[in-house]
Amino acid sequence: MGRLNYSARKIDGLKVGQVLAKDLRKRIPPETASRAATRDPYLEIDIASKGLTDQGLAQFIDDLITCLEFRDRDHPQGVGRLTELHLQNNALTTRSLMKLSRVIVLSAGDLRELDLSGNEIRVVTPEQGLAWQQFLDSFRHCYMLKKLDFSHNPLGSRGIEILARVYMRSELDFVEVDGEDDVVGNASQLEVLSGGFTSLRIENNNQENERPLARASDGQHSKSRPLQSSKNRSSSLTPLEKTVTKTDIKRYASTRGLRSIPYLIISNVSMTDACAIHLSSVLSIHWSPEHLLAYLPGGKALSLPDPVGRCNGIIWLPNRDLGTLAQQLLAMTEEFRDWGSNSDSDDRVGQHSRRLPLASRDRSHDEHIKQRQIRKKRDIEYMRLTKRVRIDILKVEGVHSADIWSAALRMVVVCRALLLEDRDRPVSNMSAVETSAEVRHGINPEVAQMDVSYPGPFHPTTKGFAHHFPTIQGVSTVGSLGTPSLVRLGRDREHTPSRSAKVPVRASNASTSVPPQKEVWRFRLPTEAWRRIIAHAVNAEGILDRDQQIQIMRYASDWGALSQELAISGAADYQQIWKILDSVGCFTYSPWS
């Protein structure tokens, strides 16, 4: 294991970057250290607390990429495979993330730990947001990473939202161990990876490459704690178990991306209450560290913060800018996630209780009912708390504090302007919308509905019509072409219910059936065509997923939804916005489907 640790050297800034670049170039053939790099290509780089800026990182990052990319006939495993990168407590910004993205992609099957805490990574401008998102996307194929630390960076609300977006839409990729050979890429790639891991033995007091943990029970979460010391665990391994096989590599590669990282640290990142909305969706689907570590090899113990034992896997405490209600929401989200994971255990308890004596069975049944009642009560509390936090955020921070909220509103406006058609307007909703509009404009509905037109001299109800038109008066009720006559139309009009009349619910079977969803819209364009056109026009691609976009289209083109909006038009703006976002399901990002 090649360790390039500069923490004890009295150099910093550009100088430390230049020294590291020189050491990396020595590993590339035909330089002096290339033979040692061939025997052990694995690297740990530590440049913590060295005042490293973007210019300092630029001094060595290209040499690091060259070292990671180098392959030839004599060096099929390369001369550099990065396992740890420590860049904490420096002055790096989003400008350095583009080059770091390339390093992460090249180290997808090797990188175990990445520490970027205590830097100046700030996400405010669109350019910074794009760099941050591309950097997070580079973790898509990482499957060996155990710890990712972004703490003490001023990420802000926009940075956390982008993190939630990438996290929710990353694929966890649970693949069976006995699956096809393409879980890592192809068979030849497995040969290289397997050979590389086999060449590594446990060194440094038995603190490297131990056997992976036994798989945790499916869906079961337990309290977050630092990794067990590998010294105690590896002491019981036999020499054959200290190597890594192709089967092990397949198992490790069966979980990938941000969702596969057991420990993600985002404490003290300038969170606002709006961040709690996005982070709650992330917490709700994150697996426990113990479950994820079952798909990773062992190793040395990680240094982890433990904020009162409340955070499980995703460590978000402390964050001083988070309000009390926002912290309660995140804590309850983790609580509900743990409850949900224990549903299978509850079923097992219920099956076990059937084999107990009658008295014990009754006690177990009563306890089970009490637990369900408590959960139901907590469900109601959680729903109320979520609603309150969301409304307060819209009131204080505004709808433009999150990209997903503003994009959803833009799409609602455009969809309503283009897709709301009169031909889809039901009779009952038509009168309600007209009446609401007239009342808002100061028009008396009763006066507006009066028929102010006067019958002309040729109307059948005028005086002298029978005398002047005797032939028309004697026509039968049905014309020669099968069309109703004027007299018949008059009688039918008398018996036709008005718009305000109530139609019986059981008038027909069609009234109780669910109407089919609209598939052909204005100008005879299908749903998918309009979705792409409008999403591109309002810049919603990449922010709203396809299901959310279609939901907005159907909501905005629904006259019933418009009637509901008019009914609450007197409420505050932020309350009306909350109602719209809640109706279209665009408060948070949805998991990848």
Image (cartoon, rainbow, N blue to C red):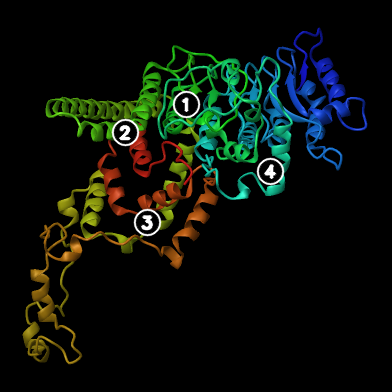
Quarter of the rendering occupied by the N terminus: top right
Q: Nearer the viewer, mark 4 or mark 2?
A: 4
User: Label 3 is placed on what type of residue?
Assistant: Leu
Q: CB of mark 2 within 8 Å of CB of mark 3? A: no
Q: CA distance from mark 4 to mark 2?
A: 38 Å
Q: CA distance from mark 1 to mark 3?
A: 34 Å
Q: Secondary structure at mark 2?
A: helix
Image vertical order of residue 33 relative to residue 172, above or below? above
Q: CA distance from mark 2 to mark 1?
A: 29 Å
Q: Nearer the viewer, mark 4 or mark 3?
A: 4
Q: Earlier in the sequence, mark 4 or mark 3?
A: 4
Q: Secondary structure at mark 1?
A: helix
Left/right of residue 548 with respect to residue 68 in the rendered view: left
Q: Position of residue 564 (x, y in %)?
A: 27, 45
Q: Nearer the viewer, mark 2 or mark 3?
A: 2
Q: Residue at x 85, y 26 (%)?
A: 36
Q: Nearer the viewer, mark 2 or mark 1?
A: 2
Q: Which residue in the protein does label 3 denote?
A: 420
Image vertical order of residue 291 relative to residue 251, above or below? above
Q: Earlier in the sequence, mark 4 or mark 1?
A: 4
Q: CA distance from mark 4 to mark 3?
A: 55 Å
User: Label 2 is placed on what type of residue?
Assistant: Ser
Residue 275, which numbered label?
1
Q: Is residue 162 visible?
A: no
User: Label 4 is placed on what type of residue?
Assistant: Leu
Q: Which residue in the protein does label 2 denote?
A: 343
Q: Quadrant of residue 590?
A: top left
Q: Secondary structure at mark 3?
A: loop
Q: Position of residue 565 (x, y in %)?
A: 30, 43
Q: Which residue in the protein does label 4 denote?
A: 190
Q: Residues within 10 Å of mark 1 (few under 14, many from 20)?
A: many
